[in-house]
Structures are given as structure tokens and as C-alpha cells.
């Protein structure tokens, strides 16, 4: 059973809840304030912040050699 992260729109409390596939369409109640105004958090762990500069590969070589 997958674990999803939700956040409450009323009290702003994030919480985790295991949801069945049949329960994905409905939002769970907030465990803090028991509110139904909750939304699913999108886990953005795929944000690639690795800045790898690909243009600094030629160290010292003059770029005019390829244009001869
Ligand atoms: Zn709440």
C-alpha cells in the first residue's frame, strides 16, 4: 500500500497516510483538525539541481583548431 503525503489547507499540517488505490480519488481527513480540506502533496524528489557545466571540457585547447 503506497504512502502518500497530504497537507491540510485549514491548519497547514502535513501528514502521511496510506491510501488504497480505491481511495486515491478521495482526500483523507486531517488528523490534527479533522478537516476534509486536504490536498495531496506532490513529492518532488526528482528535481535535478546538479549543475554540470558541459561547456568547460576543453582546458587550454584553443577552439580555433577545429576551424582549420
Ligand atoms: Zn488540519
Image: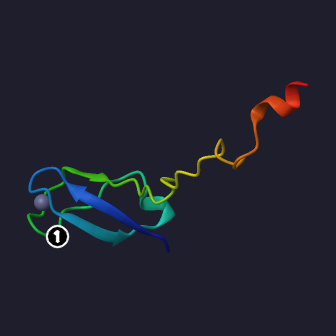
Q: Specify the farthest residue to the top.
A: 67
| In the image, residue 53 above or below residue 8 | above
Identify which residue is drawn at 10% across, 51% down: 10
Q: Which quarter of the frame holds ligand 1?
A: bottom left
How many numbered circles does the render carry? 1
Identify which residue is drawn at 46% across, 60% down: 45
Instruction: Say which element carries label 1.
Output: loop
Q: Pick whichever, 58 or 39, lies toward us.
A: 58
Answer left or right for 65 relative to 4: right
Answer left or right for 7 relative to 51: left
Instruction: Estimate how packed mark 1 is, as few (under 14), some (14 to 19) or many (20 or more) residues with alpha carbons within 10 Å.
Output: some
| In the image, residue 23 above or below residue 39 | below
Q: Position of residue 35 (x, y in %)?
A: 13, 57
Identify which residue is drawn at 11% across, 68% down: 32
The answer to which image quadrant residue 54 occupies is top right
Q: Position of residue 56 (x, y in %)?
A: 64, 46
For label 1, the residue is 31
Answer left or right for 3 relative to 5: right
Q: Position of residue 68 (x, y in %)?
A: 91, 25
Q: Position of residue 59 (x, y in %)?
A: 69, 50
The answer to whether mark 1 is within 8 Å of ligand 1 is yes
Amino acid at each position: 500500500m503506497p504512502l502518500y503525503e497530504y497537507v491540510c489547507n485549514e491548519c497547514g499540517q502535513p501528514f502521511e497516510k496510506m491510501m488504497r488505490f480505491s481511495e486515491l480519488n478521495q482526500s483523507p481527513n486531517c488528523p490534527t483538525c479533522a478537516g476534509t480540506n486536504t490536498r495531496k502533496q506532490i513529492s518532488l524528489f526528482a528535481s535535478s539541481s546538479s549543475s554540470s557545466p558541459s561547456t568547460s571540457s576543453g582546458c587550454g585547447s584553443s577552439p580555433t583548431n577545429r576551424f582549420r
